[in-house]
Image: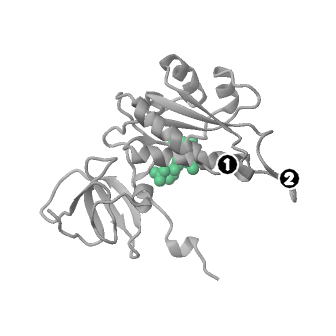
């Protein structure tokens, strides 16, 4: 069943059972939200969308649109295979001068997780994730630009973190960037050595129903200029 409804398409995606995707005038997906009720005038696609051919595909645009902050996880464990896939994707992240100054601490043990969540308390959804990946950086290993002594540690770490989030979305798993944790508490609770500064904690798990907020983005014309 395939019928087009203005600039909105409902599809059975990888991340949600049924999602409403809204596109802007240039065909760029601007929001993905759960869609509950089916009507006569809906468009269904199974799998991800290729906007050019409107056939199932796995383009990067589809993947980027599918990734969103998931703030609700089921208790279903993350398989070793999925975790291995995500780590292998993370490893391929580029870094300044190829320094690879990062370290990924994968927390699967519930007791360790209960200590970790003290650094970001009061968020049940965060605590409920079956896996937490603490993305750390060794500041002494990161490249520093000689002109202005600017360290690229956080840039490098951000890239590997987003590889993790995109790889997880590719496996229908949910993630959320979390930086609003107390680094001193986290370092103490996990006994992190000085050369492992935590930059972002990524909860990872199977998305709970209704765990999605619409993706809102500024218009392309506002964020790009061509000269
Ligand atoms: C550097 C960074 C830090 C973030 N820290 C948090 C956080 O501490 N807690 C949280 O719930 N979301 C956090 N987020 C998620 C953002 O709120 C989210 O990415 C943004 O609202 C866009 O929504 P989307 O990820 O669903 O596209 C963070 C995102 C980034 C990139």
Report the quarter where the C terminus lies.
bottom right
Quarter where residue 124 is shown: top left
Is the C-beta separation of discs 1 and 2 under 8 Å?
A: no
Q: Which mark is residue 166?
A: none
Q: Where residue 150 appears, x then y in whole percent? A: 81, 53
Q: Which one is nearer the viewer's eye here, 122 or 53? A: 53
- Mark 1 element type: helix
Q: Is residue 202 above or below residue 53?
A: above
Q: Which residue is mark 1?
A: 156
Local packing at callout 2 (Cα closer than 10 Å; few below 14, some 14-19, many 20+) is: few
Q: Which residue is mark 2?
A: 149
> Ligand 1: does it lie within 8 Å of the C-beta at label 2?
no
Toward the top, the furthest residue is 111
The answer to whether residue 3 is left or right of residue 200 is left
| Residue drawn at 55 percent across, 29 percent down | 106
| Residue drawn at 48 percent across, 40 percent down | 86
Q: Which one is nearer the viewer's eye here, 179 or 45? A: 45
- Mark 2 element type: loop
Q: Where residue 216 appears, x then y in whole percent? A: 45, 60
Toward the bottom, the furthest residue is 227
**Distance in Å between CA atoms under marks 1 and 2:** 16 Å
Local packing at callout 1 (Cα closer than 10 Å; few below 14, some 14-19, many 20+) is: many
Q: Where residue 149 appears, x then y in whole percent? A: 86, 53
């Amino acid at each position: 069943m395939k019928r087009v409804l203005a600039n909105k398409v409902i599809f059975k995606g990888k991340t949600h059972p049924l999602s409403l995707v809204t596109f802007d005038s240039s065909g760029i997906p601007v929001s993905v939200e759960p869609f509950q009720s089916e009507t006569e005038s809906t468009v269904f696609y199974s799998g991800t969308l290729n906007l050019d051919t409107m056939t199932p595909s796995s383009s990067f645009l589809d993947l980027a649109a599918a990734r969103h902050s998931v703030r609700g996880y089921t208790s279903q464990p993350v398989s070793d295979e999925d975790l291995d896939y995500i780590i292998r994707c993370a490893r391929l992240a580029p870094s300044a001068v190829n320094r690879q100054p990062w370290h990924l601490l994968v927390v699967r043990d519930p007791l360790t997780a209960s200590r970790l969540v003290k650094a970001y308390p009061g968020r049940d959804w965060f605590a409920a994730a079956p896996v937490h990946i603490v993305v750390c950086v060794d500041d002494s290993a990161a490249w520093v630009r000689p002109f202005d002594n600017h360290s690229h540690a956080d840039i490098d770490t951000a890239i590997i973190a987003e590889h993790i989030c995109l790889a997880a979305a590719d496996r229908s798993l949910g993630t959320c960037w979390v930086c609003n944790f107390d680094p001193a508490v986290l370092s103490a609770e996990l006994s992190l050595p000085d050369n492992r500064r935590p930059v972002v904690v990524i909860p990872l798990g199977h998305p709970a129903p209704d765990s999605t907020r619409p993706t809102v983005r500024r218009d392309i014309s506002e964020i790009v200029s061509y000269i």
